[in-house]
Image (cartoon, rainbow, N blue to C red):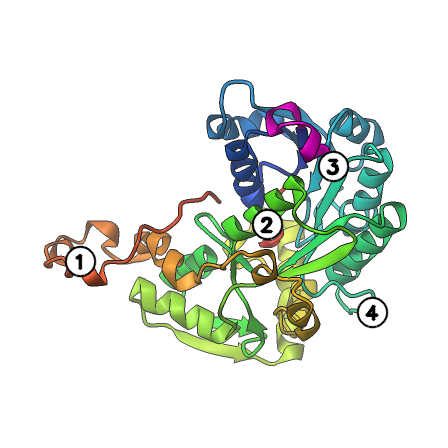
Amino acid sequence: MIGAIRTPSQQLVTVFGGSGFLGRHVVSALAKRGYRVRVATRRPALANFLQPLGSVGQIHAIQANLRDRASVAHAVAKADHVINLVGILQESGRQRFDELQAKGPRLIAELASPNATIVHVSAIGADPRSESAYARSKAEGEAGLFQVRPDAIVVRPSLMFGPGDSFFNRFAALARILPVLPLAGADSRMQPVYAGDVAEAIARAVDGSVPGGRVYEFGGPQARTFRELVQYVLDVTERKRLIVPLPGPVARAQGSVLGFLDNITLGLLPDEFVMTRDQAILLEKDNVVSKEAAQERRTLEGLGIIPESFEAIVPSYLVRFRKTGQFDLRRNALPAPPPDVLKPDTPEGSAVPGNNQTPGH
C-alpha cells in the first residue's frame, strides 16, 4: 500500500544489523531502488563503509541495541519498513540468544508503526524442540513476532555465501594452516544460497511484492553434504588435506572444549578455530529448504528469483587462498578460452558466524 502511494525516495527503511555480512547486500539492494536507509547498529562508526552504496545522505547509520528498548524505539521512529537481520551463532558477554534472537523480533514489532512492513531474517532449522539453544531462540523469535504482527514476513536462509562469508573463507583459511580438517556433521546436507539473492528477496518484500504472514525458505540450486563443500574448497584452492568426519559425541565434546577455550581467553582464539557444542548440535541435521516450502512456492524461485550457484561465485574470492593466488604468472599466461565458453561476470558483494548463516549486528 505504501509503495503505491509514495516513491521509494519518500520512504524510510530501518535495517537492524545492516553493517553485517547480509546487511551490506540488503542496504545496497534498497539503495539501488532509491529508498532512504537507516542502518541501526551497535557501532555506527563502523558502518560508514555503507555510505558509498547510495547517494549523498541516502544511507545513515544510528546507534541501536536490541537490549535497549529506547534505542530500538528511536531506530524505528517514522520508518515505513523495518528489517531485522540481527543474529549470532554463539553467545559472548551480554550478547545472548534470549535477548537478541528470542525477544528482539517481538520488541521491534511492538515499537514499529502498525503500518510498517516487518521483515525478519531467521534461519532454516529454527525449531522450538531442538537441542540447540540457537535453533530454539530462532523459533521463539518467529513466534513472538507473529503474535504481535501476523502479517510479518519471515525469511529462513540456508548457509549464505558471498565475498567475506564465514564458511567458504573459513575453511580455505583452515586448509592453509592444518594438514587435517576434522568435520562435525560431515554428511549433513546444506543448500548454500548467495547473500545477494536473499537481499533481493528482502528488497522485493519492501517493494510490496512478497505476501506477508508467511515463512519463506531460501536455498541455492544445489544441495551438498558438508564434506562435499569442504572438498570443493580444497579443489578451488588447490590444496590436498585429509578430511576426517567426527562422530556426533566427539564433535560435541570438541565443541565444548573449544567453546571453553574461547571463553577463558576472552575471545582471543582465532575465529577459524572456534566451534561451540551448540554449533556441533546444529551440524547434525540437514540445512536445506523443506519439501513443504518448495511445494508452496515459499522459496526464491517462488518469488521469481533464479538463485546463483556457489560454483559460479565462490572461486572469484577463494583464489587468494591458493599458494600463488591471483598472481600466478604461469596460470595467467595461459591463452584465454574462446568467447563461446567465457562465463559472464560474477556478481559482486561484500562480506553468522552467519547462520553465517547469521548476519552481524
Amino acid beneath label 3: Met
Q: Secondary structure at mark 3?
A: loop
Callout in the foreground (3, 4): 3
Q: CA distance from mark 3 to mark 1?
A: 46 Å
> Residue 282, position in %: x, y?
67, 67
Query: Is 205 above or below relative to 82?
Result: below
Residue 1, which numbered label? 3
Whichever of callouts 2 and 4 sits on the residue coming sooner in the sequence is 4
* In-front residue for pair 197/88: 197
Residue 201, which numbered label? 2
Q: Secondary structure at mark 4?
A: loop
- The magenta span reads 1-11
Q: Secondary structure at mark 1?
A: helix
> Residue 201, position in %: x, y?
59, 50
Residue 10 painted magenta: yes
Residue 340 appears left or right of 237: left
Callout in the foreground (3, 1): 3
* In-front residue for pair 23/147: 147
Identify residue for label 4.
129
Identify residue for label 1.
339
